[in-house]
Amino acid sequence: GITQPQVWTAAASPHVVPSGFTIRAAVTLEPCAVVRLGPDVTLIVNAGGSIVANGLADRPVVIERQDPARPWSRIQALGGGTLRLTHTRLLGGGAPLNAPLDAAAAIDVRGADQTQPPGEQLHVDNVLIEGSASQGVLLREAGGFSLASTGLVIRGSAHAPIDAWASAAGTIPSGTYTGNARDEITLEGTGLGAIVRDATLRDRGVAYRVGDSLTDGRLDVAARPPLTLATLTIEPNVTLRFKRGGALFVQFAQNTSPATGALVAQGTPQAPIR
């Protein structure tokens, strides 16, 4: 693994990575750097580690397949590891290995403490994720995008562009999420993935789908102590689709205490909520 800071230069490109390893220090990719990942390779960025790709509009960073016929697997941020990607192209990843397509992605981001609000472990600025053999991005265990993220394009995925805990859906940035096998943002809406604090489903140009092959089509909205109220706000023009048998529960338990869940869905005639 990498335990000391490194700079991967454009001059030394391509940087060929035939097998996976763990990153526990800063790895900086210069503008125009090219990284080629071997088949099924996973890079794990752990606490204290980061990948900082400093591409420019005319000199992007490229992360691609070493073998044109076989995808790499994922770049995974765990336990506080971070990814900061600027003008970066991630091409041909997402090998699902033994997992279902909706449990894998080219970028897999998870927080250090899944009981906390979504963190900002993933920052994207004009980033393309193309040709994933599964999904583009997976957000679980309190993983999230930075508030400043923008300009994300995910296309050519073998499944959905993004699969996220519902609690992290409000961090998904503006971008383009069409041209995939399933042009929907998939949400996991129960357990720790439920809406337990204020969250907003924003209009990102594709529908949200509640439920995948591993989870039911249920979305729960209910605060947990010490919070007393969780509000789910749905923006105009948003479509929310449910897996067969799914349900939306806004503080579904019956009791004599004040409500702990709320739903605000205010569409317009020109941009209804569906």
Image: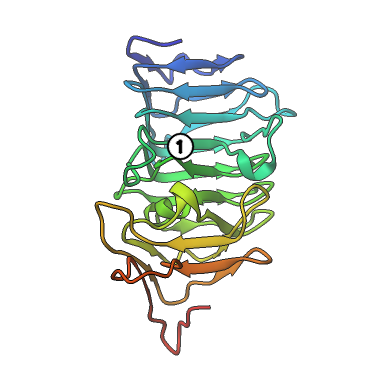
Coloring applied to the structure: rainbow
Residue hosting label 1: 109
Q: How many marks?
A: 1
Could you tell me which secondary element the residue under label 1 belongs to? strand
Q: Residue furthest front?
A: 256
Please indicate whether residue 260 sits to the left or right of residue 215 in the image. Answer: left
Where 271 sits versus 29, above or below?
A: below
Please indicate whether residue 206 sits to the left or right of residue 260 in the image. Answer: right
What amino acid does circle 1 point to? Val
Q: Residue at x 48, y 79 (%)?
A: 273
Please indicate whether residue 95 sits to the left or right of residue 136 in the image. Answer: right
- Horizontal and vertical percent for residue 218? 56, 61
Circle 1 Cα neighbour tier, 10 Å, few/some/many (<14 / 14–19 / ≥20): many
Where 60 sits versus 160, above or below?
A: above
Q: Residue furthest bottom?
A: 269
Judge by depth and name the residue closer to the eye, 224 or 78: 224
Judge by depth and name the residue closer to the eye, 167 or 34: 167
Q: Residue furthest right?
A: 69
Q: Residue at x 53, y 78 (%)?
A: 274
Where 206 sits versus 100, above or below?
A: below
Q: Can the viewer see residue 172 in this picture?
A: no
Q: Can the viewer see residue 214 in this picture?
A: yes
Q: Residue at x 35, y 21 (%)?
A: 49
- Horizontal and vertical percent for residue 195? 40, 58
- Horizontal and vertical percent for residue 60? 44, 35
Q: Residue at x 43, y 21 (%)?
A: 10
- Horizontal and vertical percent for residue 67? 70, 23
Where 198 sits versus 104, above or below?
A: below
